[in-house]
Amino acid sequence: MKKNILTLTLLCCTLGASAQGISQEMLSQFAQQNKLSGSEKAIKNALAAGPVSALALNQDNQVEQNTFFSNSVPSKGITDQKSSGRCWLFTGMNMLRAKMMKEQNLPTGIEFSQNYLFFYDQLEKANLFLQAIIDTRKQPMDDQTVRWLFQNPLSDGGTFTGVADLVAKYGLVPKGVMPETYTSNNTSQFTTFLKRKLREDALALRADAKASDKALQAQKEKYLSEIYHMLALGLGTPVTEFTWAPKDSEGRSVYEPVKYTPQSFYKEFINLDLQNDYLMLMNDPTREYWKTYEIQYDRHTYDGHNWLYLNVPMEDIKEVAIASIKDSTMMYFSCDVSKFLDRTRGYSDLANYDYDAIFGVHFGMDKAQRIQSFDSGSTHAMTLKAVDLDESGKPLKWEVENSWGASYGHQGHIIMTDEWFDNYMFRLVINKKYASEKMLKASQQKPTLLPCWDPMFSVEE
């Protein structure tokens, strides 16, 4: 405690020697320089009564949307992640179900059980956390890695890497086989108790510095069994086999139901090698392009893979995205979704809101500066499904299938201008058959390892 007080005192002395605080003279000067005009007083009154976004809405940009897309992947039905951070899981499942609907020519849409994979995701993340605690138990509690682990024991967010590893290990089941629960749709409170239990378990694992690895593994297994019990209560116990057949529009089975395991169901209807045949592309202008990067401690399963991506210029991402859409293949896509989004229309356009005019200041950071200063990063995953090209083949706008329900935005979709895409799109996962030779070659290099607390690498929710 005395050490902390001394440190704070020295810091204050240092700041006092090199910088000035806000004086009364400054305050008087600011007040004189910023006397509000009549129109600014009207803005002040409006801000006191409502949100900034409502006042900044550009009415000149409220004309009827052009919803035509020259190239679009067909789909049936909009999913809804409700009050959960599982957009990454819904997006991955939406990408896969589009393939199944296309190839099986299903009379109605199909949705896979997000709850089924979410159960295993949470159990696997619990194991990752507890094992990391064992591996770092000799490091002090204020070590940056240890501190980060205790701050982030697990979450309901994730990335495509998690989808690939979980599906490879546990397969898929239709949604009706293991439907959603209140807890899976509303994860916040339940996740709080999972985190609390894991932190308590972690402290116990660190308590005996002389404990053998065998004893610690046995202790960890006991804790994981308790987490399994909590998950079974909140989410239900995952199915190991089931009978299923697609249904027509009236809910009748098209043919006699067949018995499946989750793995055999996946093999029969999807049968993709998600772990090896797909490539995650990133557009991060703060780092060197055509380099691969790996995120430390970012796995969903212990025997899976860290989050790995290739950083490339935006024009190269657009090129392969267009090729995939033209071949009727949806893609996992993530972005900073809330920026300049008109939620009512489901329309993302830099011209939607004029914040400069409201506040009388200029917001001028570019994409790289927004990343470096923690002002922007990927926050949400959706499924990229359409592009509108001009006569020369250049994109004008894009469309994604969202997982916020059919009543949200443009019939469950968000339309994005190409300029918005440049500024706030971050990640795209493509089948390697659409990748250029340069991408494939660059993806084989040894990745640069980045820390889990890097400003760019929050998980999608």
Image (tube, rainbow, N blue to C red):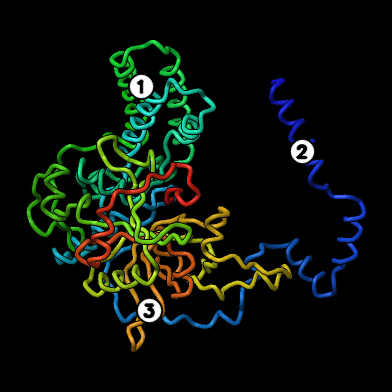
**Cβ–Cβ under 8 Å for marks 1 and 2:** no
Label 2 element class: helix
On screen, 72 above or below 120? below
Q: Marks 1 and 2, how far apart in space?
A: 47 Å
Question: Which label sits on residue 272?
Answer: none
Q: Which residue is mark 3?
A: 395
On screen, 234 above or below 322? above
Give amino acid for label 2.
Thr
Nearer mark to the viewer, of 3 and 1: 3
Q: Residue at x 47, y 52 (%)?
A: 456
Give amino acid for label 3.
Pro
Direction from residue 268 to residue 136 in the image, left or right: right
Nearer mark to the viewer, of 1 and 2: 2
Q: Which residue is mark 2?
A: 14
Label 3 element class: strand
Nearer mark to the viewer, of 2 and 3: 2
Q: Name, please, the residue furthest toward the bottom.
A: 391
Q: Residue at x 22, y 61 (%)?
A: 432
Q: Which residue is mark 1?
A: 223
